[in-house]
Amino acid sequence: MRLDVVTIFPEYLDPLRHALLGKAIEQGILTVGVHDLRGWATDVHKSVDDSPYGGGPGMVMKPEVWGPALDDVAAGTAEGQVLDSSLPHLAKPRHDDIEGVAARTYESGEDSDLPLLIVPTPAGQPFTQADAQAWSNEEHIVFACGRYEGIDQRVVDDAAQRYRVREVSIGDYVLIGGEVAVLVIAEAIVRLIPGVLGNRRSHEEDSFSDGLLEGPSYTKPRVWRGLEVPPVLFSGNHALVDRWRRDQALLRTQAVRPELLNHVALTPQDQAVLDSGR
Ligand code: 6GU
């Protein structure tokens, strides 16, 4: 997978070089290009924004700068900077690596071969785990980071000629710009590429993958500061452990995010557990 990010703060994307994403870069599963939008500014001051038509506070990012930037990145002619991994650690396999999990080959998820353009904005559609799952099959994703009051809307409208465009929000709060949202979205996507996380089960059981929040986890010691690990986990009875985990997930979801239960298929046994938890 190749990710390209266009931003006026290239150094903000440096965290992509670390940990899991750095490892994916080192393995050759992932390439990340970061592009300074100011490289496409045409005036002496390298300005990228201007006051909004119709008045109001703040500044709007200029179409004459963004247009050529997105053209060049779509065409693969933008220079930018390719991030290298921060990690000198690949020789040592992680505990969750699985042998024989190869990098996936990518089929296009939609009818088109156009790259995906993700525009992070608080005015976008909510970004979900289902999006992360779908986009983990993409070959080329471009992120356009807006700052200030946003990007001239014609940039997004025009980009649809060269990209499949998605305007997405990572939650109901306002960030200064799209860069941190790109870190969030990129991490959610890249960890789902086989070979990156290693153990496939570890994301099949993620919160949200089955519509429920994950219940609690425990490791040694069996008693810590007087607190005991639930005894069922020592029973050696896998069916019983699975049922207990499901119950914990149901009860936690009911307590913390009850609205999620409206989209989960509940068995009579699930329903009985929820009724007992009220
Ligand atoms: Cl994706 N961008 C910005 N700038 N603010 C946000 C957001 C995105 N999601 C929530 N707030």
Image (cartoon, rainbow, N blue to C red):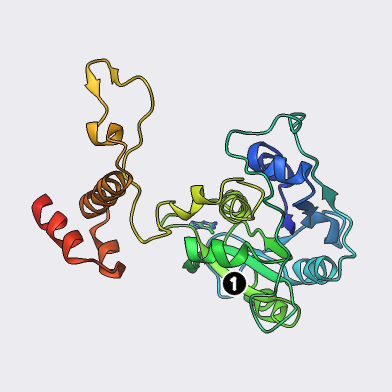
Q: How many marks?
A: 1
Is residue 137 depicted above or below 216 in this figure?
A: below
Q: Where is residue 261, by image quadrant?
A: bottom left
Asked which quadrant contains residue 55, the reply is bottom right
Task: Report the front residue among 179 and 195.
Answer: 195
Q: In this orientation, which residue lies closer to the viewer: 223 or 118? A: 223
Q: Is residue 150 visible?
A: no
Judge whether residue 129 can be spotted in this image: yes
Q: Position of residue 33 (x, y in %)?
A: 79, 53
120 vs 47, left or right, is: left
**Position of residue 91 in the picture relative to residue 238 (left or right):** right
Is 62 placed left or right of 136 in the picture? Answer: right
Q: Secondary structure at mark 1?
A: strand
Q: Amino acid at mark 1?
A: Arg
Give residue 155's position: percent from left, percent from top.
69, 74
Residue at (30% x, 67% y) in the render: 264
Residue 229 drawn above or below residue 102:
above
The verdict on label 1 being within 8 Å of ligand 1 is no
Q: Nearer the viewer, residue 178 or 65?
A: 178
Q: Quadrant of residue 141?
A: bottom right
Residue furthest to the front? 237
Image point 30% across, 46% down: which residue? 245
The residue that appears at 62% across and 53% down in the rendered structure is 186
Q: Which residue is mark 1?
A: 166
Sort mark 1 into few (<14), some (14-19) or many (20+) by Cα contacts within 10 Å: some
**Residue 163: image location, x then y, percent:** 72, 76
